[in-house]
Image (cartoon, rainbow, N blue to C red):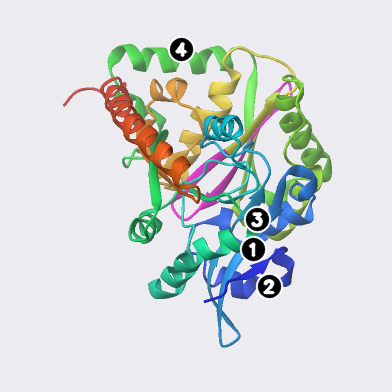
Amino acid sequence: MPLQRLQSLSDVAAEQWDALVPDGQPFLSHAFLGALEDSGSLGPQSGWRPEHLLHVENGRLVAALPSYRKWHSYGEYVFDHGWADACKRAGIAYYPKLLSAVPFSPVGGARLLAARAEDGFELLAALPGYLEIEELSSAHVNFTDALADTALGEQPGWLQRYGCQFHWQNRGYRDFQDFLDALSSRKRKQMRKEREQVAGQGFDFQWLEGRELSEAQWDFVYACYANTYAVRRQAPYLTRAFFSLLAERMPESIRVCLARQGGRPVAMAFSLIGGDSFYGRYWGCLAEFDRLHFETCFYQGMDYAIAQGLQRFDAGAQGEHKLIRGFEPVITHSWHYLRHPGLRAAVKDFLAQERPGILAYAEEARAALPYRQA
């Protein structure tokens, strides 16, 4: 079965694409992925060329793999730089490669979009042939859900990799104090002290939905976001236009928390809501304040999730600072198909050695959670 290639989401109707996207997954929507493309955040100039693979049957889109042709490994959060370096030393071309993931965001979810499972299987079965024709070294599918894990696990040649993130679970808490009551005494005092330190600096917090922000407020959001890169002397991945397009196309999914001091905003956290999940994505500040990051990005998000009845809070990559604040370890999965047999064998051995360490790390992290022992 030949796959069709889509180099711009604007070439497919939003209704057709979104009909394949499971409920509660805003990062896979035509609005979100299309905004990345239309804003110039993605494109050949960035090393991310949209290359969405489609299975079309009798003129009807029945399955899709949102994906990108890449000439580097930045912005992925599943790190294969070592594989690329090994290829370079061995004289093997690692780039370009094909990546299926949400650009610049380590968010899990569906990857194989299909109305029927068999349509998705047919797309996956055709993928190795596509890689060969296009002279792509490999295909990578990052942060998969259980359905994608099952489908990819049944295909020959795919290697599974484990990772670990930290998510907060709302266990039916009535309010933030109810959450604190579930913690050990020492951790409860620590969190209460952190919040008091921020309040003592005169901060208050304002929550806004996407349609409620003015252009001036969006300018502030972007200035904060861009500053997180500027302080590291890096260029931001996303353009200012991306935020405007999101506000236009999916305002109901957007939540922005503004941290204000004396009525003046000084920091922000940008999040999306999908189903019963709350996704903290971008943070930034225009000045440094003690503990403000933890309050704006974590405690305010917990407060909001509890008030809105949201069950899960995914606050992004990395974790030790989340762990001590009640975010629990979650094993993540990614899948990798490498055409070169020698590279595939070497990576298979590497993953077999890496996996026990990931699982042990997650178990050690779980033992360090701040919750009271039953």
**Dot 3 alpha-carbon crowd within 10 angstroms: few under 14, some 14 to 19, many 20 or more:** some
Magenta extent: 261-280
Asked if residue 226 is among those painted magenta in the image, a careful observer would answer no
- Label 3 vs 4, first from the N-terminus: 3
Callouts 3 and 4 close, C-beta under 8 Å = no
Label 1 SS: helix
Residue 366 spot, x, y in % from top left: 29, 26
The quarter of the picture where the C terminus appears is top left
Residue 293 occupies quadrant: top right
Residue 269 within the magenta-colored segment of the rendering: yes
In primary-sequence order, the first of circles 4 and 1 is: 1
The amino acid marked with disc number 3 is: Phe
Instruction: Report helix, strand or loop for mark 3.
Output: helix
Between the C-alphas of marks 4 and 2, the distance is 52 Å
State the residue at coordinates (35%, 38%).
331
Q: Residue furthest left?
A: 374
Q: What amino acid is at disc 2?
A: Val
Which of the 4 image quadrants contains residue 148? bottom left
- 1 or 2: tag closer to the N-terminus: 2
Residues at marks 4 and 1, CA–CA distance in whole angstroms: 43 Å
Q: Which residue is mark 4?
A: 193
Observer-side mark, 4 or 1, equals 1
355 in relation to 57, above or below: above
Q: What residue would you read off at disc 1? A: 30
Q: Position of residue 84 (x, y in %)?
A: 58, 35
Q: CA distance from mark 1 to mark 2?
A: 9 Å
- The residue identified by callout 2 is 12
Q: Which residue is mark 3?
A: 32
User: Label 2: how many residues lie within 10 Å, few (<14), some (14-19) or many (20+)?
Assistant: few
Quick one: SS at disc 4? helix
Residue 364 appears at what percent x and percent y? Answer: 28, 22
Mark 2: secondary structure: loop
